Structures are given as C-alpha cells and as structure tokens.
Image: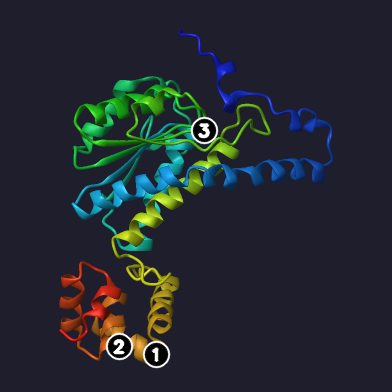
Amino acid sequence: MQQINLSSMLTESRNPNSEKIDDCSTLEILQIINNEDKQVALAVEKELVNIAKAVDAISQRFSNQGRLIYIGAGTSGRLGILDASECPPTYGTPHEQVIGLIAGGEQAIFKAVENAEDTPELAVNDLKNIHFSSNDILVGIAASGRTPYVIGGMQYAKSIGATVISLCCNLKAPMINIADIAITPIVGAEVITGSSRMKAGTAQKLVLNMLTTASMIKIGKVYGNLMVDVEATNAKLIERQISIVMQATNCSREIAIQALEQSQKHCKIAILMILLGINAEQAKQKIIKEQGFIRQALQTKQD
C-alpha cells in the first residue's frame, strides 16, 4: 500500500487548544469545540472572491441547461448529496440539475465502503453513468484535497472540457492544481485530530450552501428573499406558498389561496396575477418571457 504523508496536511495536524480535552468537564469540552467552530465562518469569508467566481460559472451553466455535479467521499460526499437533495423542494429544480456522487455509491451514504475512495476509475465510471458532459460543471469536495476518487473525477471532467471547481481545506493540495476555480477555506487543525467532519465539514457545508443558494438567486428562483419556486409537496410547504404570496403582495390569505389555485400552485404566477391584476395565463406568459425573474416581469408591466 502506498504510504500517505499525513504530516503535510493541516487537516491532520494536532490542535494545541484541545490536547487535554479528555481531562475537561463537559462544559469545557463544548467551549473548546465552540471556540474552534468560531473560526470557520472567518475562513470561508477569505474565500468569497473564489466562491463568487464559482457561483457565476454555475449559474451560467444552469442558464444553458447544464448541471452541477458534486463528487466526494465519506463526509464530503454526503454533504454534496445533502445539498443536491435540498434543491428540488426548495427551488423547484429538476432532480437531475444538481447531483451528488459519493465514492462507493448509494450504500456509502449510510455506511463507509472500504477502499472506494482510493480508486480514481470509480469516479470516471460514476460520471459516465450520468452522462457528464462539457456543458456540466464539477465540484470536487475533499477536506484533505488529495482523495483519489475525487481527483480521478476532476481529471476526467477536465479532459472533456468541463469547468472544474475544488473545495478543500489544505493549502498545496493536489486538487487545487487541477481546478479552474479553487475554494480553499483554511480552518486549521481539528479539535479531534483528523476528524475533518468537524471544522472542515462545517466549512464545506457553508460553501455548498452559498454555491447553490446564490446560483438559484441568479437564475430567478428567488424574489426578494422569498423562495418563489418552492414546490407544495406537503402541508408545511402548502402553508409556505400561501405565506410567500401574502408577503410578496401584501394580500389577504384568501386572495393568496385563490391565486395559487388559479395558477396551479405556482407562486411566481400567483404573485404576478395579484400585483399586475392579470389572469393566470397572462402571468405565465410574462414569467416565461422574463425567464423566471419576477422583478423584471414587474418592470415591464406595461406590455
């Protein structure tokens, strides 16, 4: 087996602030963890310029019918799947628009699959199985920045002309050299040495939240700060739709419900109907014309 030099990875280094954590009271343990967690948002803040570049690239792909694909192993892979799975109910996106791939496949979501992350070829197969193309964009996620499965996927994506983004927490990581855009929040040594599901995982989650949220805003999925493409798939989300229409238009609950019924539960159409005093078909055509952007549709209300 090839020897891995862990000493060169910041995510594997020992944290002096927690060296005696096993001799602490419960409250002291939690204070140490909390103090370390406070550093994560600041580390992400330093990467905002690179995150913005990634968002612009992703939203451009979305506008051209491209997809966002996350690829990772272990915690990193699970975080990508989590972010991808939240997009359809929140923003009404097709399930294939944002996809998370994990080393070892679906079973690895729940239980570690030994050696899966050490095989670059598995990533190539996984990407080919979803018909990954140059019109798609790939985000490789790995705290260490050296996971073979992730690197294999990134290299394949580059070879076919796709844009590649890296998200890792180690400087000078191999993934950075492959990426077109590198996002590298340096969160430092973990409270428990090598437990990168902690600060590194939190940093990754914050960045992934930003990537999809900002990209969805840029393609018209948000009006103000309201998720106007939310799908009403359960009782809570039905109520959320009603609330969104009421907040966007300052209308009564009764008017919001009526507009949603007439628009077949499409918040955007319902909002335009109320604000512009038009019927559902007119609102639908206007939102199509403005490519889903409510604000633009309102600015052209004289049409």
Residue bearing the label numbered 1: 251
Mark 2 element type = helix
Circle number at residue 148: none
Residue 60 percent location from the top left of the image? 25, 51
**Relative to 203, does residue 153 appear above or below in the rendering?**
above
Mark 1 element type = loop
Q: Earlier in the sequence, mark 2 or mark 3?
A: 3
Q: Residue at x 42, y 88 (%)?
A: 250
Asked whether residue 194 is in view, the answer is yes
Q: Nearer the viewer, mark 2 or mark 3?
A: 3
Tell me the crowding category of disc 1: few under 14, some 14 to 19, or many 20 or more residues within 10 angstroms, Cα based: some
Q: Residue at x 41, y 42 (%)?
A: 50
3 displayed left or right of 88: right
Residue 255 percent location from the top left of the image? 35, 91
Number of marks in picture: 3
Asked whether residue 88 is in view, the answer is no
Marks 2,1: beta carbons within 8 A: yes
Of residues 268 and 170, the one drawn nearer to the viewer in this rendering: 170
How is colour applied across the structure in the image?
Answer: rainbow
At label 1, which amino acid type do we have? Cys
Q: Nearer the viewer, mark 1 or mark 3?
A: 3
Tell me the crowding category of disc 3: few under 14, some 14 to 19, or many 20 or more residues within 10 angstroms, Cα based: many
Residue bearing the label numbered 2: 274
**Relative to 222, does residue 207 appear above or below in the rendering?**
above
Mark 3 element type = loop
Q: Quarter of the image for the C terminus: give it.
A: bottom left
Q: How many angstroms separate mark 2 from mark 1 (CA)? A: 8 Å
Tell me the crowding category of disc 2: few under 14, some 14 to 19, or many 20 or more residues within 10 angstroms, Cα based: many
Residue bearing the label numbered 3: 169
